[in-house]
Amino acid sequence: EAQVTQNPRYLITVTGKKLTVTCSQNMNHEYMSWYRQDPGLGLRQIYYSMNVEVTDKGDVPEGYKVSRKEKRNFPLILESPSPNQTSLYFCATSPYLGETQYFGPGTRLLVL
Amino acid sequence: GNSVTQMEGPVTLSEEAFLTINCTYTATGYPSLFWYVQYPGEGLQLLLKATKADDKGSNKGFEATYRKETTSFHLEKGSVQVSDSAVYFCALTYLGPNDYKLSFGAGTTVTVRA
């Protein structure tokens, strides 16, 4: 079954404690992306990757890091989380840049 | 730049009512336009899309037509059901020779009552 998985689904942490949210896809898609969803703001892109070892900033990259060492995985790293990073995070993939995206189930993060 | 603006919600309807959610875009080129739907507790999934002017996307009784003259991509459904309760997002992607832009609207929450 084609799917995008994210872990964890829910996370409560404290300010400054490094965390990683994993994203994995089994569709052999080139393009992967991270978004955050906040009330009234819709989805905003954090980072995207067009292929292995190729990543680029989206609209709101500050405070986040990503890596793309393998085609199937695209982890999101928060080196020093702050309360303003409390949000719902989605990973998405598509065969190529600009095409229909397939979203993961989301990770709800609360930073205290 | 390239961006989308969609109708603010929330929208509350009775079953079998007509639904319209407005979406307009600004674009420097010829973007592809999408409607995504997010059911409660789930990620977004594609509802329909259109890649060029005058294309009509349709799925599950929903339709939207890519109107270049009015820069719009309004979503419509003639008779909604309770199961259509969700958040709907308009989105565009633009892929040019030296430029890439992706933009989502803020989302419109639709609640359909029996």
Image: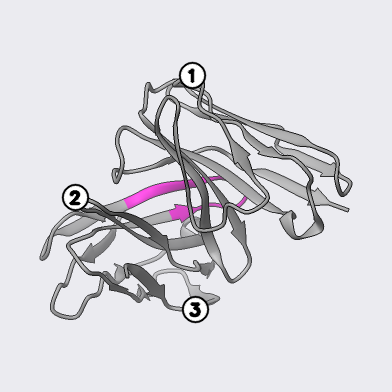
Name the amino acid type tagged 3: Glu
Q: Name the residue under label 2.
A: B97
Above or below, B22 against A29 in this view is: below
> How far across and down, in percent of the image, does residue A17 sit?
85, 40
Q: Do labels 3 and 2 share a chain?
A: yes
- Residue at left 31%, top 32%? A95
Q: How crowded is mark 3: few (under 14 residues within 10 Å), some or many (20 or more)?
A: some
Q: Earlier in the sequence, mark 3 or mark 2?
A: 3
- Residue at left 50%, top 68%? B106
Instruction: Work out whether residue B77 can be spotted.
Output: no
- Residue at left 44%, top 54%? B37
Do the residues bearing badges 1 and 3 touch, measured as CB atoms within 8 Å?
Answer: no
**Range of magenta residues:** B37-47
Label 2: chain?
A: B
Q: How crowded is mark 1: few (under 14 residues within 10 Å), some or many (20 or more)?
A: few
Q: Does the magenta stretch include residue B46?
A: yes
Q: In this view, does B110 lie to the left or right of A50?
A: right
Which of these two is toward me, B11 or B3?
A: B3
Q: Name the residue under label 3.
A: B8
